[in-house]
Image (spheres, helix red, strand yellow):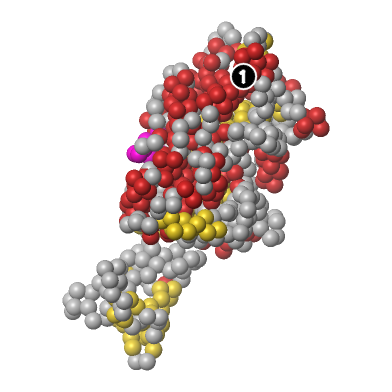
Amino acid sequence: CGQPHRHTFPLDHPPGLPPTFTFHVNPVLSPRLDVELGEKLTALQGGPNAEPETWSSKQGKGGIPLSSLPVGQEEQCSVALGEGQEVALSVKVEMSSGDLDLHLGFDLSDGEQEFLDKRKQIVSKALQQVLGLSEAPDIGQVPVVAVLGSGGGTRAMSSLYGSLAGLQELGLLDAVTYLSGVSGSTWCISTLYKDPAWSQVALQGPIERAQARVCSSKLGAMSTEQLQYYTQELGVRERNGHSVSLVDFWGLLVEYFLYQEENPAKLSDQQEAVSQGQNPYPIYAAVNVRTNISGEDFAEWCEFTPYEVGFPKYGAYVPTELFGSEFFMGRLLQLRPEPRICYLQGVWGSAFAASLDEIFLKTAGSSLGFLEGYRRSVDVTDDFQELQLHDPTRLHTRLFTPQGPFSQAVLDIFTSRLTSAQNFNFTQGLCLHKDYVAGREFVAWKDTHPDAFPNQLTPMRDCLYLVDGGFAINSPFPLALVPQRAVDLILSFDYSLDAPFEVLQKTEEYCQDRGIPFPRIEVGPGDLEEPRECYLFAKANDPRSPIVLHFPLVNRTFRAHLAPGVERQTAEERAFGDFVVNGPETPYGMMNFTYEPRDFDRLVALSRYNVLNNVETVRRALQLALDPRQAGERAGG
């Protein structure tokens, strides 16, 4: 079950001062306390970083069966280590008591539940206005609405601003309970939540600030000053006990792209933004993967919220302030500082971390080769010519070797083989219930799936490997479909350029494997070739299944309309709306992080318009979600 916890001490310690150690042991998984005799070796290599001493491989080994020790009594034990060596130990076994330092269970966190109680009041009043009801719906009948933003880098981030602006203009934003995203959408959401009252003020201000960042040059991100800042920050992170990887460096680049200054915010700070139910509850998505299995074959959804970070699959959650600390058997062993949100933004959008060279080619007009003053070589360490979204362990990685005092730190970053963020596994050592396979999140009925083997489950592993949720499904449907959230209506904003229904089809397959109610996704050949702006999917006669409103990113009627029902008149107006979102010359490619102001304005205006132009469909879906008796009318179209 992973590497054993180990303490090392000399046998010739001062008399009367025996070292005392506390081991946290699962008696079922670890029935024996092992003792090894090693030989102390003096380090031969000098220098300020040389270790003063090391320990050789074991010279003798013995152990104490834990089952032989009485509980609560101190026992004197002599452990034979071979070759006439033995060690005397005083051992006392105690059963662990008290509350765990993490949340085990499938119920919602106290913070989220308190939020829901307050949010329902706001949603009820919003529904009365939007639907023109004579009185506000009863709190117990208020439907739960979730807005989901797909991945897609800067395109997704910019588009989500427009979609949210459209919802706000229609008075629908206050009817939303959850706001969740993958990859680029998380950059929009996490930036908005810096303001605890963001949804209560016009979004024009945040959109203008986003435009200033998106349309500015990114050359400064690799200046000498910034490189020194990155090295300093990563050094602090490493000294705090975190494992530093390419994804952490990418997170600092995202920080520059989004703010162009240091952002001290942490995810737990966003508790203030939901403390009164004043904004939708944010849920950020990542997936835990294996280094030897593709993301399509194994990906466990991990949710990040202001109150908790955890796995709905296992029902295991850690307080957000403690994410990154070291746990064993549900106990906090080593407290570490909560990471700044930029490092989480790097994880949530880590699909881009392995393609830094291409990003700078797109954003700065040059690859990393423009750093001739610092660079000695740029080599391709992995022979993959394109980003492979469904295999996070096989990504295009560049080796960058700059000169200067920070060269080794940056070298270590760029030679990182994997683009996953390696984190302490807060579920390590937890013993799952023997009937875990009955849980709907497990797909153990597939004989070859790791879920079929208890010793391959994540609680048996030392580390988490968290990556962009897009490696599994490019929209956070699995987190919205957690049964305890009881989501009635999902507004799905899909900002992908190709396959406008892929996230729905993958979600349908995901739900079929796990017995989760979800509507049938059926679209005609014409819709695949030229999608409409909005689709309503619902499962007839099944109130357990959510209604899904799906908005592909298309320029269908915006091209000819300034606003719903208002045609463009002038040549300038027609030119603004006449653009192709997806095409060989699109400015909205996944690796493009810098737009021209006109391109940014078009994308935000298009996304806003597509919401406004389908207000009647949204109202119809809200009415269906509000009145379960109309469930029989829930048919897609």
**Which of the pair 323/581 is nearer the observer?**
581
Q: Residue lying farthest bottom? A: 83
Q: Is residue 94 left or right of residue 556?
A: left
Figure quadrant of residue 143: top right
Label 1: few (<14), some or many (≥20) within 10 Å? some
| Image location (x, y in percent) of residue 45 | 31, 76
Q: Is residue 559 left or right of residue 69?
A: right
Amino acid on which the number 1 mark rests in the picture: Phe
Residue in the image at 62% along x and 56% along y: 384
| Image location (x, y in percent) of residue 463 | 48, 58
Residue 334, can we see it?
no
**Which of the pair 555/301 is nearer the observer?**
555
| Image location (x, y in percent) of residue 447 | 70, 60
First to last magenta residue range: 262-270
- Give above or below for 383 relative to 473: below
Residue 500, can we see it?
yes
Q: Which quadrant is home to the C terminus?
A: top right
Residue in the image at 40% along x and 67% along y: 5
